Amino acid sequence: MALINIVYPHTQVLGFAVHKADTSVIWSRFPLEGFDVYGYFDAYSYRGRQSGLDVLVTCEPLVVLPGEYNETVWQHFDYVLTFVDSLVEQGAKFRKFMPAVYDLPYTPEYTKVIDLTYVQPMPAKRNAICMINGNKSSHIPGELYSKRVEAARWFNDHSDLPFDVYGTPPFHQLPNYRGVLMPHSQKFITLAQYRYCLAFENMYHPFWSKGMLEKMPDCLMCGTVPIYLGCYNIEEYIPLQCYIDFRQFKDYAELDRFLHEISDTEYQTYLDSIRDWVSKGNLERHSVHRLYDKLLALADSTVSEAELAAKPWQPGLAPGHAHLQWRISQKPAIWSWKKMASVVPSEAILRGEFADNKAEYMFRQLNHMDISAEFGTEITGGKTTPVSSIVEFSDLKVGQRLKVEGTLGEDSMFVALKISIKAPEDEAVIEGCIQNVDYQKNTLRLLNREFVLPNGIVVKDSQRHIIGLKELKADDRVKLKGIYSEPKGFAAKTIKVEESKDIHLVELQGDINKIDQEKKTLNVVGFTIKVNENAMSFKFTSAAKPHVESAKRDFIKEYIKQGDIVFDVGAHIGKKTDVFLANGAKVICFEPQPDCVKVLHARHGNNSNVVIVGKGVADKTGQMQLAICSKASTISTFSDEWKKGRFVGYQWDKFIDVEVTTLDEAIQAYGYPQYVKCDTEGFENQVLRGLSRPVPYISFEFTIEFLDRAKECVALLQRLGYRDFNVALGEISHLAFPEWVSSETLFEFIERSEDKLLWGDIYAKFQPASPVNFQGGGL
């Protein structure tokens, strides 16, 4: 029997309750004594620790309640549920939840539910564009309140497309304001009559807006095409065919032309895509019932959210709770809405930087192994206990939870490339590429192991849509979550298709079952993991900064400064671009794949610090044939030799002619860069041949099987005067050497590695004998 108390000071439905089996959820304005779990809707609901698990549910974004996004607030809670993906990546205390839009009790007479009866066919949509928002303002950088007003005013003044504004407080400053839509049903009736809805969230920010927000669901429920801006990575949540991404237009005039030119057939394609997405049950993830399931799963580790979601919540108290009376907690509120809303966040908070709660390490010898201890929280009886920092391999203990990233050797032994100490969890994780699926036997082969899957296992694609097991196929990258126990082994509960990565990279998460100190091996989730002995060259300390000068250095943070020009050659969809922008750089993205260019325009098209060049880069200008791998676009290439390496099992199934330029031409057009990042899948040597003058810093990707090609690249750079080199292994930009070294030392280090799939980036620094004036064209 479990009791969950949702605490929300503005609730109009006192005592609203739902139940499932022997669990009840009760809403109240103040905490009720004696509950197992407390879900506080934003921090101003909190009145001090209660007897159960205290969970902060961040309903409002940074732009509305900046004071809520602070570690001094978070430390009061056992968990923080957030829609911000960037926070979820910070550690186990943060858990992902989708903004709750449906099944919320708004008034005693009205509970907002998913209702598809509002949808109108295209001929009935006689109105052009609407905007339904609150008339608000904010002092936080990245706010979109002013952008909403700006858009409404522009369309009123410059377009013949009718643009109607609704909302409260009233937009009296706008001539196209049409009033308040009440009750909620009137909002949906009105929304469904429009072809488009300008759906701007409260905020657009590269850190704080990563994660699905709330403006999109109502549009999709009513069959109205959103013109969307807000979620920084919206393409990871909603198919591009379901909305118009405002970021792909340079100004309102270009958007206006686009809307004028859409034919009825093209518009119907949007409606069909929306209907398909909604019909798969995707709106259900925005039900507050999923939040109840998450809170219950936090309290009871023996059940998963997927299992709980299979059973519906019913209105009214469960019979076992009907006789109970609850006392209201008399503790005073710690924070007020007004106080939290008026906070001015620091520059560090706006950048997504917090007091460092991760153990730092001291670097003794050079090695690509990276073991990092994470300060998580162990939940015991509603209290939090810090996890001790790890000093050396000998300090690892059976029962500690690890995240291990690495490769599978020929003897099926797991070779670790990176190990992280994680906060305790019950679920184990296995991630890798499918080797075989047997639909009749309900088995899946992964990491040279065969896993028997339970009937009805939940399978989701990369867009989080539920799919059938038969839609899985060999080479799909999947993440299995389940329970591991001995001697039963791993029992999978859910499967999710992940984005393509190096086919050989695999990941495990789970508790340490065995440790062999002599052989330096671990057993996690039934796999024996070999730890390179040189990994013991790392020590850990809980200090906020490294104690010694030789600690690992992040190239991007150290060498890329505000206003620097960076060439992102092989930008793909802009993941590295995001990192450069976060450091204040102006980024020139070179990307020849048309689909990737579309995503870049969607993400950065309106950013004045980004220039998107839909071309490849080579040793001379002209046209070249690009081989595209549809299954893994990250390995599309100009190089035939590249296809014979570690990705030999993949198919390059599409060939297109694309325009190519050179680094010299790019410098003339866009100015001298501080840094050139080159990631062109085996074509790096040809890219470097197109550079005749040195730039301060340059890097190129290498793989161990084509080390001769890497040496050729270094030789090309040496002819330009480069003498100082370094290397970062894997995806991260942490330099392996504490100081810049010679090419001989660099390759001696790389060739010492026993890793047959070693890869990373080689960095070169130009150190002229006399001062050089780096100059050229400009942005």
Image (tube, rainbow, N blue to C red):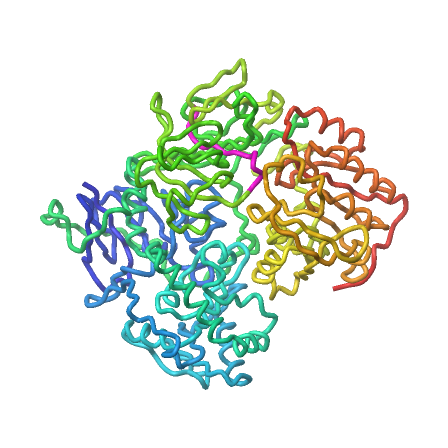
Does residue 555 appear to the left or right of 2 in the view shown?
right
Q: Quadrant of residue 717?
A: top right
Q: Nearer the viewer, residue 246 or 177?
A: 246
Q: Nearer the viewer, residue 739 or 464?
A: 464
Residue 203 sits above or below residue 418 on the image:
below
Residue 446 sits above or below residue 332 on the image:
above
Residue 648 sits above or below residue 76 on the image:
above
Q: Quadrant of residue 79?
A: top left
Picture residue at 52% right of the left edge, 34% below the top: 506
Picture residue at 22% right of the left edge, 51% below the top: 313
As drawn, the residue found furthest toward the top would be 518
Q: Quadrant of residue 273?
A: bottom left
Picture residue at 41% right of the left edge, 34% below the top: 444
The quadrant in which the C terminus is found is bottom right
Count of numbered circles in the view: 0
* Residue 375 location (% of width, % of height): 47, 36
User: For residue 502: magenta?
Assistant: yes
Q: Which residues are magenta?
A: 501-512
